[in-house]
Amino acid sequence: MTAVLIDGKARALALRESVAAGVREFVAAHGRAPGLTVVLVGDDPASAVYVRNKGAATLAAGMVSAEHRLPAHVPEAALLALVAALNNDPAVDGILVQMPLPRHIDSDKVIAAIDPAKDVDGFHPVNAGRLATGLPGLVPCTPTGCLLLIEEILGDISGMEALVIGRSNIVGKPMAALLTAKSATVTLAHSRTRDLAAHVARADILVAAVGVPHLVKGEWVRTGACVIDVGMNRIALPDGKTRLTGDVEFEAAAVRAGWITPVPGGVGPMTIACLLANTLKAAWARSI
Ligand code: GUN
């Protein structure tokens, strides 16, 4: 069997178009566009690229994009003061503090300082708790994007075996919560899991989010499975160049899977589209 390639770019484009339509409705109702503010600390080149892409996508959706760049040595208190100012700014609907932060800054403290109503990353403990308890709230963007892809392919996933590999607060844990809410039978595997191969072999749905290139061997994958690869690993090639690759051995897995996401072009574009959707959702929720 040869897997069908999941076109995250096309799905993300459709979502971005529907967000842009929602933005036009919001503007008609409120006389202003929703605003997303991104805070970037330091000069990590990969983070700078993400932030630039987010800004461009925000503008393309018809929203107001703002960016604050702080030097790597900025005191934690200054960052917390900026977050407090953004919390109090009525024109700001969404606040995103780009991770990772420099080591002298406590990320948990910064995340907790963001108004949960503006937490478009869905990282605040209030939003994490809401997701865990089935209450409405802002949900992290990457797992939301993964679920949209999964449901578009499989429809009702109730009763299916889902394996999530990776227990981060950003992807793995919220992914497991979302799949559980859809009545899948969910296993959350991580670095201490014994016999990962046996778990992978049972999974109708596999979401790999560990950041270890090719951890999941193609031969482990269940025939016909839906494989979502969140990994974005930069690896060196023999010629000295680099390329991005996922957590799954793509070619070998594609022989067995029913559907598989490419890296790049699978989950990545969905994350930004879901961030725009969260910003619009936050704007509506704050304006009622
Ligand atoms: N760094 C890499 N991905 C993300 C993300 O989705 N949100 C934030 N805030 N930082 C990131």
Image: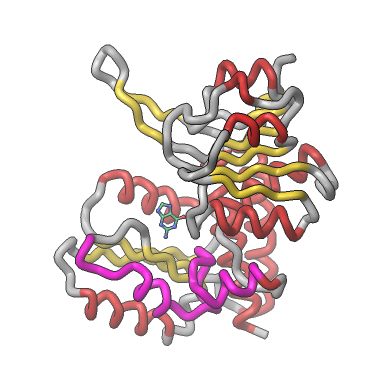
Residue 38 on the magenta span: no
Pick whichever, 215 or 10, lies toward us. 215
Ligand 1, seen in the image, is in the quarter at bottom left
Residue 269 can be seen in this image: no
Pick the quarter of the image with the N terminus: top right
Q: Which residue lies furthest to the left in this view?
A: 73
Pick the quarter of the image with the C terminus: bottom right
Position in image of residue 121 (x %, y %):
50, 63
Position of 168 compared to 187: left or right?
A: left
Magenta span of residues: 103-132
Total numbered badges shown on the rendered structure: 0
Which quadrant of the figure has residue 126?
bottom right
Position of 133 compared to 109: left or right?
A: right
Residue 244 can be seen in this image: yes
Position in image of residue 42 (x %, y %):
22, 58
Q: Image point 71% across, 53% down: which residue?
A: 179
User: Majority secondary structure of the magenta segment?
Assistant: helix
Residue 116 on the magenta span: yes
Q: Which residue lies furthest to the front in this view?
A: 194
Position of 144 compared to 116: left or right?
A: right
Position in image of residue 120 (x %, y %):
52, 67
Q: Image point 60% across, 78% down: which residue?
A: 31
Q: Image point 20% across, 66% down: which residue?
A: 104
Position in image of residue 250 (x %, y %):
55, 22
